């Protein structure tokens, strides 16, 4: 049986932004567009009250926004992209040395949404450069399916609706 290796298919890059100061979304968007090319979709800005995880570092009353990029990427690049977003975050520190904004890159294709992190956990795979990845949502039928470890915010209809729209853009993009 012929078992030839294949290059991975291209995927749609997105970056989730989380901050108390929604004006930082526009400031960082310019920098992200310079790094990753034009955006073909942005989500609404939502209130983010899904856990207290970031409260000590970033404060309360956080807001979330996603930016989706037009140019498809090789998924192999996601760990390097995460490192670039970490460097951007370091340019926006508060007086205590904590982040003013959190930038979370990920990607989607027709079947799944993948998030990346610097933190290892039982369901994460090492991707290189100190970065781990996880499949956080699976597309099945006509909707996204959550997994036991899917973050609470990624379980919401608003996220699912935005990611479905981005998935449609991905499917229309020539590969």
Image: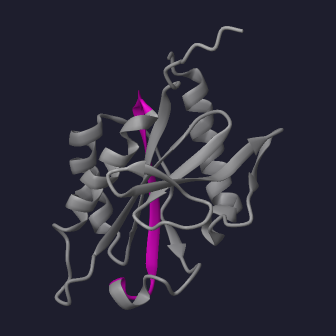
Residue 162 sits above or below residue 93 on the image: above
- Check the image and name the residue furthest to the right: 141
Whether 171 is drawn above or below 151: the answer is above
**Residue displayed at 58% across by 13% down:** 4
Q: Quadrant of residue 148?
A: bottom right
Percent x, y for residue 114? Answer: 55, 48
Residue at left 38%, top 91%? 56
The residue closer to the viewer here, 129 or 57, is: 129
Lateral position of residue 122 relative to residue 132, left or right = right
- 88 vs 40, left or right, is left
Residue most extreme to the front: 1
Query: Residue 164 at x, y = what percent?
Result: 65, 42
Quadrant in which the N terminus appears: top right
In the figure, residue 88 lies in which quadrant? bottom left
- Type of secondary structure dominating the magenta stretch: strand
Write down the region rendered in magenta. Answer: 58-74
Instruction: Left or right? Give the position of 140 relative to 123.
Output: right
Q: From the top left corner, tell me how far across and down residue 43 is, in percent.
A: 50, 52
Does residue 126 show up magenta in the picture? no
């Amino acid at each position: 049986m012929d078992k030839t290796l294949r290059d991975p298919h291209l995927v749609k890059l997105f970056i989730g932004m989380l901050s108390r100061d929604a004006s930082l979304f526009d400031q960082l968007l310019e920098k992200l567009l310079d790094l990753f090319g034009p955006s073909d979709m942005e989500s609404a800005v939502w209130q983010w009250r899904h856990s207290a995880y970031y409260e000590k570092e970033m404060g309360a009353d956080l807001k979330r926004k996603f930016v989706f990029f037009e140019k498809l990427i090789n998924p192999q690049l996601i760990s390097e992209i995460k490192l670039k977003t970490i460097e951007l975050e370091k340019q926006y520190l508060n007086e205590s040395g904590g982040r003013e904004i959190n930038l979370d890159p990920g990607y989607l294709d027709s079947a799944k949404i993948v998030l990346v992190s610097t933190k290892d956990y039982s369901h994460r795979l090492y991707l290189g450069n100190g970065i781990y990845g996880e499949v956080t949502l699976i597309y099945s039928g006509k909707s996204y399916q959550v997994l036991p470890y899917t973050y609470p915010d990624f379980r919401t209809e608003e996220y699912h609706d935005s990611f479905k729209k981005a998935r449609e853009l991905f499917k229309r993009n020539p590969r």
